[in-house]
Amino acid sequence: MDVSMFFLKFLVVLLTAKIFSEAFMRVGVPAVLGEVTAGIIIGPSVLGFVRPEATFQVIAEIGIVLLLFEVGLDTDIGQLVKEGVRSMMVAVTGVALPGAAGYLAAKAWLGMGTLPALFMGGTIVATSIGITVRVFRDLGKQNSRMARVVLGAAVLDDVIGVVVLAVLYDLAVGGTVSVIGTVRILAFIGAFLLLAPILARLFVPLLAKLVAHGRTKGMVPTLVTCMILALAVAAHAVGAPEILGSFAAGIALARSSFLPLGPKIELHSKELAERIDESMKPITDLFVPVFFVMVGVSIDLSLADPGSGAFWGVVAVLTAVAVLAKIASGIWAEGGWREKLATGIAMVPRGEVGLIFAEVGKRSSVFDDRTYAAAVFIVAFSTLLGPLALRGVLGRGKRTAISDDMP
């Protein structure tokens, strides 16, 4: 692909993302669904103009890394810690129940082999943290107690998902599972999550001095972006998703620090916090929609076998299992049935995470073409259904007891 063609395709990605997100928002549907739909239309499913090529995938990864940084920057870590037990229960239930139910349905009901059934269970395990966070923002609920519970659960969900993928990949390639290797990955990820924000905070005084005395333009976005990328690389090096590194960077640069047994500590001035937010927002607004468009591009609906009742039967059964099992994880949410239902629905979208599982299954020859296509459709339906259902439960952005930022 030459440079001019890349520019044209990138133009189409940016323009369709904005057009569809604006159109969807005007009819009360979350903007993220418009961006995913834009990707489906310009991607292999319909027009085939944009494909999930490496260059666009890299730009998309920049978008999700920046989104999680922004989420971390706006997160009250003290409130997030307070919801830790509840988030952990939601996360564990939201992994164990879909994984087990997906495996049993695929093996016992649909007749798949053990390894394909395990991979199918893995495909419906992990929640897409990017889509979930964006839906809450589109609905104006990002500061609610529910959003904090879901955010904590989705972060844990992502970590567990990486470990599950590593285990299944070892099983597919080598036929065995390395217990020592799995424990090592968990230990590295745990150490990273504990140490990364602390190390990053050591950078704050240097950043403040450079911003105060620097004479060149763009000092803040350049240094902050370098920090985000450094922690994303460090996260990958220890076996964690890159987005956990950028999330840690956001938490580190948030104005207040929190210790469970101590008071909040002001890390830097309000002025610096505002400059960080203002400097990074235009970059985030440009790159984040690309990620969601590429999620849609990666969902190739043309793989379907429209005349096969067996194919659609597999898709229907496993989609129902994927959705209902995730919704059940909301039982741990505080409040009545509406809060519990909304929390469970917020964990439904699979997005890029499920597609990664499906792709690994295909590359390792665990999935044949038909099973891979079914996995893609299951991910697509859960990705599209989650934001719509969550909006239906939470309403048209009206302030309710669910969205109150209760202490």
Image (cartoon, helix red, strand yellow):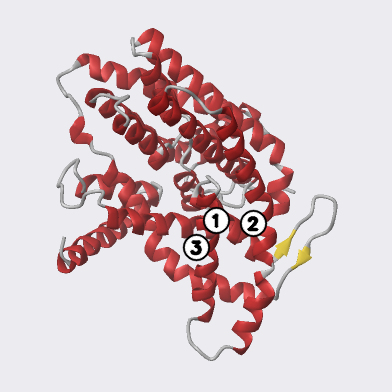
345 relative to 202 in the view: left or right: left
Look at mark 1 in the image and give the residue it sits on: 234
Query: 278 or 334, which is in the foreground?
Result: 278
Residue for point 43% across, 37% down: 349
Q: How far across and down, in percent of the image, does residue 318 sit?
A: 38, 21
Mark 2 secondary-structure assignment:
helix
Q: Which numbered tag is attached to residue 31?
A: none
Give the mark, 3 or 1, whose residue is nearer the N terminus. 3
Give the mark, 1 or 2, whose residue is nearer the N terminus. 2
Asked whether the beta carbons under mark 1 and mark 2 sit within 8 Å of each other, the answer is yes
Q: Badge 1, how many Cα within 10 Å: few under 14, some, many 20+?
A: some
Residue for point 35% across, 56% down: 58
Mark 3 secondary-structure assignment:
helix
Placement of 212 over or under 380, stated as above or below:
below
332 relative to 237 in the view: left or right: right
Q: Badge 3, how many Cα within 10 Å: few under 14, some, many 20+?
A: many
Q: How far across and down, in percent of the image, does residue 88 sit?
A: 65, 35
Mark 1 secondary-structure assignment:
helix
Look at mark 2 in the image and give the residue it sits on: 196
Q: In which quadrant of the rendered image does the N terminus lie?
A: bottom left
Query: 1 or 8, which is in the foreground?
Result: 1
Query: 343 or 295, which is in the foreground?
Result: 295
Q: Badge 2, how many Cα within 10 Å: few under 14, some, many 20+?
A: many
Residue for point 74% across, 44% down: 82
The amino acid at mark 1 is Ala
